[in-house]
């Protein structure tokens, strides 16, 4: 008994098995798994300026790599994919950081069409080492919505995007 008359309890021992484990987010859909053909592959070189104080690529630069890869893909889409009444905007992004990217590095950003909606396109992505596609740095997805810049309202996907992503 303790000094206040309450029974003493023994301290709980936490075992390694009881310790909370960080869950890895699931990888993008099966379309983005190895074996499926990517919609587009962009080659990106890591720049010295991309590094942070820990000497690896800063997390914010992953978004820049993804933006660059989407722009490279869009520049290869035959036919018009935007005009004064229909332009893409980024509506959502998901990035799973799987391992740090060190400098120097040559990257490949693989894009996969995960979903075609009426006005939106979901692109899954993988950032891998250019020399070893099994070295996965990051995966995830982004949602792009085509909208009328004057009204801010969604518009149907351009036919060129629908054909290029199918």
Image: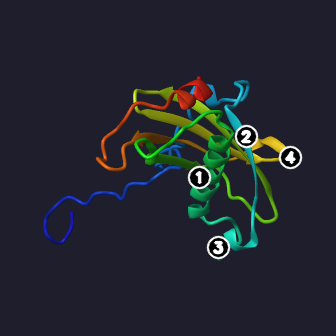
Outermost residue, front direction?
84
Q: How many angstroms separate mark 1 from mark 4 (CA)?
A: 22 Å
Residue beneath label 4, please? 131
| Residue 104 position in % (x across, y down) | 82, 64
| Residue 91 position in % (x across, y down) | 41, 46
Q: Earlier in the sequence, mark 3 or mark 2?
A: 2
Tag nearer the camera, 3 or 2: 2
- Which residue does the image show at 80% across and 59% down from the upper left? 105
Residue 21 can be seen in this image:
no
Is residue 154 left or right of 70 when viewed as pictured? left
Residue nearest the observer in this picture, 39 or 125:
39
Res. 36 image quadrant:
top right
Give the crowd class for mark 3: few <14, some 14-19, many >=20 residues within 10 Å: few
| Residue 151 position in % (x across, y down) | 29, 47
Give the crowd class for mark 1: few <14, some 14-19, many >=20 residues within 10 Å: some
| Quadrant (top left/top right/bottom left/bottom right) for the N terminus | bottom left
Q: How many angstroms separate mark 1 from mark 2 (CA)?
A: 13 Å
Residue beneath label 3, please? 52
Residue beneath label 1, please? 67
- Which residue does the image show at 72% across and 59% down from the upper left? 101
Outermost residue, bottom direction?
53
Q: Earlier in the sequence, mark 2 or mark 4?
A: 2
Outermost residue, right direction?
131
Q: Is residue 48 above or below residue 159?
A: below
- State the SS at label 1: helix
Residue 69 can be seen in this image:
yes
Q: Earlier in the sequence, mark 1 or mark 4?
A: 1
- State the SS at label 2: strand
- State the SS at label 4: loop
Q: Which mark is residue 41?
A: 2
Q: Earlier in the sequence, mark 3 or mark 1?
A: 3
């Amino acid at each position: 008994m303790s000094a206040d008359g309450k029974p003493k309890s023994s301290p709980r021992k936490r075992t390694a098995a009881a310790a909370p484990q960080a869950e890895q987010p699931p990888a993008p859909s099966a379309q983005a798994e190895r074996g499926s053909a990517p919609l587009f592959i962009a080659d990106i070189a890591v720049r010295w300026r991309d590094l942070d104080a820990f000497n690896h690529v800063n997390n914010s630069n992953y978004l820049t790599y993804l933006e660059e890869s989407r722009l490279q893909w869009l520049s290869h889409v035959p036919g018009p994919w935007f005009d004064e009444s229909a332009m893409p905007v980024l509506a959502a992004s998901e990035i799973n950081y799987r391992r740090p990217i060190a400098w120097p590095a040559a990257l490949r950003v693989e894009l996969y069409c995960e979903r075609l909606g009426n006005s939106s396109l979901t692109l899954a992505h993988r950032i891998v080492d250019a020399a070893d596609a099994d070295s996965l740095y990051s995966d995830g997805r982004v949602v792009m919505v085509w909208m009328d810049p004057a009204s801010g309202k969604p518009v149907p996907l351009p036919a060129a995007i629908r054909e290029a992503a199918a």
